[in-house]
Image (cartoon, rainbow, N blue to C red):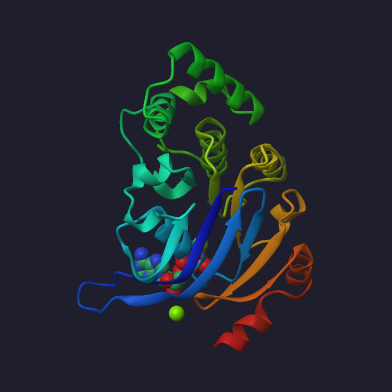
Amino acid sequence: MATLEIRDLHVTVDAAANEPPKEILHGVDLTIRAGETHAIMGPNGSGKSTLAYALAGHPKYTITSGSVLLDGEDVLEMSVDERARAGLFLAMQYPVEVPGVSVSNFLRSAVTAVRGEAPKLREFSKDLKAGMDALSIDPAFAQRNLNEGFSGGEKKRHEILQLELLKPKFAVLDETDSGLDVDALRVVSEGINRFRERGDTGVLLITHYTRILRYVKPDFVHVFAAGKIVEEGGPELADKLEAEGYESYVKASA
Ligand code: ADP
Ligand code: MG
Ligand code: MG
């Protein structure tokens, strides 16, 4: 059974050139097993995206101590491509606009990178079409330039489309619900649920809001405040946050 283990992770971010790096994550412990969905919830600025960037290997974020293991393999030693080949999906791996690279070409290269060989064009086109249909994405989208002028909703659908095509073991989804209207939220949530229904997959869903958790039911909820997990529970914790907000956690960790 696949396991993603984050152990006592401390992360600093490069600050301005004349300032020392600032520690943002102060020791995060989290284990996700295949078949589980974990939600990380917390106020703005609590370090949720920093965790996602650190897992993705973003160059601005430095892991000063702790470890991340995927089935016992050291993720932090892996290149971005190696992380993807190992079965880790981090949407923010490829957030950039790439002039002249279409969505379709980008996705085919991504599938090639993960599999170690190029998918047959017919097979890929069929999978791409099925994925786009399932997410109610206009066929013309495949020929758009990657990330160029994407709306918030298009970015998120593209993220889930990658998930459908790359078939990773673990998906880390950061604010997948932000900027979505109700219909898009439903379509995106259904995509995440299809991924979960494969059964041998794990999801880390990072969000500020509880509303996506009405569609994607987490097994575990972790509350982030000031760079740490300050509370953990089951889905009922999301209901408590919805009713009471983060204020008590922010005060306690200040
Ligand atoms: P969240 O995703 O929970 O809103 P972030 O991880 O984005 O929180 O930010 C946590 C803290 O780290 C904030 O104080 C933010 O200003 C700081 N931070 C994050 N990334 C950077 C960066 N690239 N440069 C400077 N500060 C950063
Ligand atoms: Mg520590
Ligand atoms: Mg964030």
Q: Tell me the quarter of the picture where residue 21 sits.
A: bottom left
Q: Tell me the quarter of the picture where residue 241 sits.
A: bottom right
Residue lying farthest to the left in this orientation: 18
- Image quarter in which the C terminus is found: bottom right
Q: Residue at x 40, y 61 (%)?
A: 54
Image position, residue 173 (x, y; %):
55, 51
- Up-down: is 118 above or below 239? above
- Up-down: is 30 above or below 139? below
Q: Residue at x 35, y 42 (%)?
A: 81
Question: How many numbered marks appear?
Answer: 0
Q: Residue at x 68, y 65 (%)?
A: 221
Image position, residue 31 (x, y; %):
57, 62
Image position, residue 74 (x, y; %):
39, 56
Q: Which residue is drawn at 55% across and 34% down?
A: 161
Q: Is residue 211 visible?
A: yes
Q: Tell me the quarter of the picture where residue 134 sits.
A: top right
Q: Can residue 45 be seen in this view?
A: no
Residue lying farthest to the top in this orientation: 122
As rendered, which of 16 and 193 lies closer to the eye?
A: 193
183 left or right, relative to 49: right
62 left or right, relative to 138: left
As rendered, which of 175 and 23 lies closer to the eye?
A: 23
45 left or right, relative to 78: right
